[in-house]
Amino acid sequence: MASQNISDYPDLAFNFLTNKKLYEKAFCVDPRDDICPFGTPCPNPDVTGIGQQISIYITTIIYAIVLAYIPWLQRPMLYAHLSVLYSLHIAALVSALKGDLSRGDGIFVIVTVASPATLYLWYYTAKSFWNANHFPIQHENKDKPANQSWEVKIARLFSLGSFLFEIAMICVLFIPNVKGVKFPQTACDKQFGTTALWFNVVWELPVVIQTVGMIIIYFLAYGIILLWTKRRSYEVPSPSLEPYFKDLDSEKNSTTRRENIDIVSWTERVLFDKYPNFMNRSLFICLVTIVQVSALPDLSYVVSSKDSFTFLLIAFGLFREMPRKESNRFLIFVIRIFILLFFAGVWLLRMLFGLFLVPNSADWVILFIACSAAWWSWSHFSSSNMKIFLPILTVFLALGITEANVWVAIVGDPKSFDFGTQNATKEDADGSYFTMQIVTIVTWIICWLSASAWPWQRTLTLDKFYKGLFKRAHLLKVFWIVLGPHILWIQASDASNLSHPTDMNFGQIFALIVSIVTVVTLLDEAKDVKKDIWLAILKSDVMFYEEVEQPKHYAPRPGLGMITFASSESECMHVKGEILGSIVH
């Protein structure tokens, strides 16, 4: 073969306007550090590719659901979750060794890795060093203690390794002038303001701040009521007024320990007691659903998602059933139309004049429940205990919390923590699509306990509180614990991806295959769930298996969302031994 001369290789030159995509690819083969012609760093599909993103989002959310509800799937889903984490770690490491990992890519990696499910995994990994049983996995050999299982030790080591990689990446990114570390395209860092994206790393702050605020308000209300009940002149209300579960009130269950009423059953009792001719089953389900959905972040794009969803559910609940025959039907329809017009007005005002003018529609529903609870307290308690004090406290707390939740949107947006650092794109200059405003949920909780437990000087353990809160509020549990934090995390991860490359390589395809397998596994479990269970979730009703049955894969160490309602030790042993029914079969 004849030797090739340099003249045989013609110089290639083409104009940017001729083919923008081809020009960008050519420039990004060896990008210069002193210019940033595209406004963002060159795309790095190995790290920030669309397939990588979708795979991690799907696998992480499914892993969170498994941690909360399906403990018998923790083992395979842990391996699936670790596989997508390490695929991103390895891609970032290889890219960094080649000098292709920009600072923006690094921020994307640390945000995407630190999902709510991963944070939960890291927490229990650290906790398992003192007690190996806390590690969220059911190892294959159940006869061997967890601290002697090599599977647990190796899985824990990989989990710890992902945490150490995350810490190392944070140090390299945010400690200036680290020796031996150089990120390419420094001009893009200055132009786009990559370091300003640090607020995406702390996407948890809106959740943490509001959760801490809710805890403070809760204990403040509890402390005030506790001081009131400690007065010498205070008379404990009659035990007959204390709400209990209906199925535990009968004589045949007199030997069974009685449990205080759960939050949904208490709300049902209050609303049907105070509005016997107006309230119906459909409207009640819609109201309780609205309160539970309020735990989700609010999507603000032209209109508020909470306002839209609340209006639709209110309209359905108001006109789903005809008024009772013994009621004044004309008056009932007038009230229904007035309520519908009120929520339409709230929706319109917030859409035209901004979200800070009035509370959102879900907060108005919670305020209605609080006022109903105050009215109920006035009619059920006596002046020697809670008749005057509790309604006043309830109304003032509800009004204050509702107004505070309007302004919570300021700290409910992760971008509000971008303390003045300028970004180049208009998209980053605006607020986030999803903002967290969940403080009013504590109003519902305080009203429930202040009318069902605290007046009788009863204190709830964390276990009893958890059971009472989530016994029927299934949607609140999944929205508050699983979906809400993950929505904010996905938003932060996507906002950290500056270039959004669409090229697909083999690594991304493999990651997508892993995520598809996890979806199929979850669907295989879901298809066997009985219809009654799905209806109980949608209607906020009691799941039939919770009283006397356990899933066929019953785990002695249940997941975050699994709770055993056995009332005695013997009953616990009984339900473990019998496979009567389950979520999945």
Image (cartoon, rainbow, N blue to C red):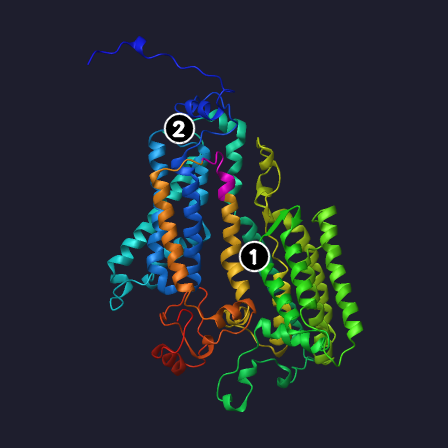
Residue found at x 77% / y 68%: 335
Residue found at x 31% / y 50%: 158
Q: Identify the residue at the far bottom of this view.
A: 251
In the displayed structure image, the side of residue 92 where residue 191 appears, left or right:
right
Is 400 drawn above or below residue 233 in the view shown? above
Residue 480, horizontal then vertical, whole percent:
53, 59
Residue 406, horizontal then vertical, whole percent:
68, 53
**First to last magenta residue range:** 493-501
* Kind of residue at badge 2: Lys
Could you say which disc has been placed on residue 182 in the image?
A: 2
**Residue situated in front as seen by the camera: 429 or 182:** 429
Residue 210, horizontal then vertical, whole percent:
58, 54
Residue found at x 33% / y 32%: 97
Q: Decide: few, some or many residues near mark 2? Use Cα within 10 Å; few <14, some 14-19, many ≥20.
A: some
Could you say which disc has been placed on residue 39 in the image?
A: none
State which quarter of the image contains the N terminus.
top left
Residue bearing the label numbered 1: 211
* Kind of residue at badge 1: Thr
Q: Alpha carbon of mark 1 to alpha carbon of mark 2: how far?
A: 39 Å
Tell whether position 494 is magenta. Answer: yes
Q: Determine whether the residue tagged by mark 1 lies in a helix, strand or loop.
A: helix
Q: Decide: few, some or many residues near mark 1? Use Cα within 10 Å; few <14, some 14-19, many ≥20.
A: some
State which quarter of the image contains the C terminus.
bottom left
In the displayed structure image, the side of residue 417 where residue 68 appears, left or right:
left
